Image (cartoon, grey):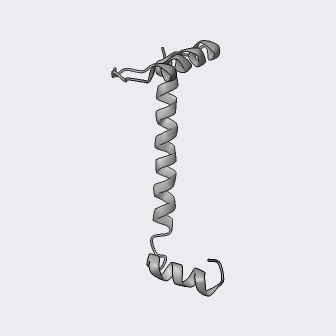
Amino acid sequence: MSNLSKRSTVYFEPAIHRALKVRAASTHVSVSELIDEAVRLLMREDQEDLQAVSARADEEEISYEALLDDLKKHGKI
């Protein structure tokens, strides 16, 4: 195991757990390392999403109804 230092119990569906074990064995890493990397990727995606929302914070808001009206006006729906 790498320098991971905290322990948690995680429950998986049996088929998912089996797939994790096969992946871990075939890539020569532990299940813990696979899960750690998956969580890091998920958090990185969240951070990118938050940055994208922040970058658009000054854009004008439009209601859903107004959006539908605009789409209809332009023949999109």
Residue 22 placement, left or right of 11: right
Q: Is residue 62 visible?
A: no
Residue 22 spot, x, y in % from top left? 58, 15
Residue 34 spot, x, y in % from top left? 52, 24
Residue in the picture at 60% in, 87% down? 73
The quarter holding residue 9 reads: top left
Q: Is residue 20 visible?
A: yes
Residue in the picture at 50% in, 55% down? 49
Residue 77 placement, left or right of 68: right
Disc tally is 0
Q: Image height check: is 37 above or below 1?
A: below
Q: Image height check: is 45 above or below 22?
A: below
Residue 8 placement, left or right of 42: left
Q: Nearer the viewer, residue 8 or 20?
A: 20
Residue in the picture at 53% in, 15% down? 21
Q: Quadrant of the C terminus?
A: bottom right
Q: Image height check: is 75 above or below 53?
A: below
Q: Residue furthest bottom?
A: 73
Residue in the picture at 50% in, 69% down? 56
Residue 14 spot, x, y in % from top left? 46, 19
Q: Image height check: is 39 above or below 46?
A: above
Q: Residue furthest front?
A: 77
